[in-house]
């Protein structure tokens, strides 16, 4: 895999503007893009990105920036049995941290899972 080296003008107020399909992930090799140090990340915002290591910065990054203790990954499915069957449907991802989830009683956990604002929605392509 080849990575291109790009640099950013620190005087520009908006570093990133995402457009459809909202799926780019930027790896910041030296920390100059995110200001969070070498090995940090920038990506479009989804509710599943709301973890302590990531910061929602809508005005400046049109998404989130995360430190180097996490990795943002692309999720892809290939060779579906019926090609196109899921096109236009949403794949939902929810933040699931065992240390938090195990502390919830059943009613709280059920309410958490039913609250759609806790999910990031990713469209199948």
Image (tube, rainbow, N blue to C red):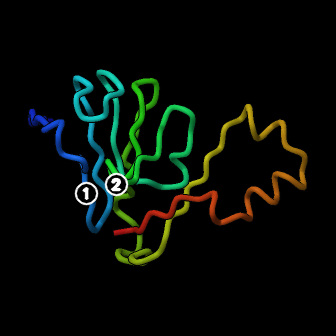
Label 2 and label 1: CA atoms lie apart by: 6 Å
Viewer-side residue, 6 vs 104: 6
Please name the residue shown 65% across and 66% down the image.
116
Residue drawn 26% across and 65% down?
A: 19
Question: Where is residue 50 drawn, in percent x and y?
Answer: 55, 45
31 relative to 84 in the view: left or right:
left
In percent of width and height, residue 81 lies at 41, 69
Residue 103 coordinates in the image, percent (x, y): 84, 36
- The residue nearer to you, when weighing 1 against 22, is 22
Tell me if residue 2 can be seen.
no
Mark 2 element type: loop
Q: To which residue does mark 1 refer? A: 17
Task: Look at the image and tell me in which quarter the C terminus lies.
Answer: bottom left
N-terminal of the pair, mark 2 or mark 1, is 1
Residue 62, numbered circle = 2
**Helix, strand or loop at disc 1?**
loop
């Amino acid at each position: 895999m080849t990575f291109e080296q790009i640099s950013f003008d620190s005087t520009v107020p908006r570093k990133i503007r995402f457009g459809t399909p909202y799926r780019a992930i930027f790896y910041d090799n030296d920390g100059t893009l995110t200001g969070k140090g070498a090995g940090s990340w920038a990506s479009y915002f989804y509710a599943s990105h709301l973890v302590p290591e990531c910061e929602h910065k809508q005005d400046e990054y049109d998404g989130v920036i995360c430190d180097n203790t996490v990795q943002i990954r692309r999720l892809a499915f290939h060779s579906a049995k019926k090609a196109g069957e899921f096109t236009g449907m949403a794949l939902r991802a929810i933040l699931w941290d065992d240390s938090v989830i195990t502390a919830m009683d059943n009613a709280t956990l059920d309410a958490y899972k039913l609250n759609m604002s806790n999910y990031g929605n990713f469209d199948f392509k």
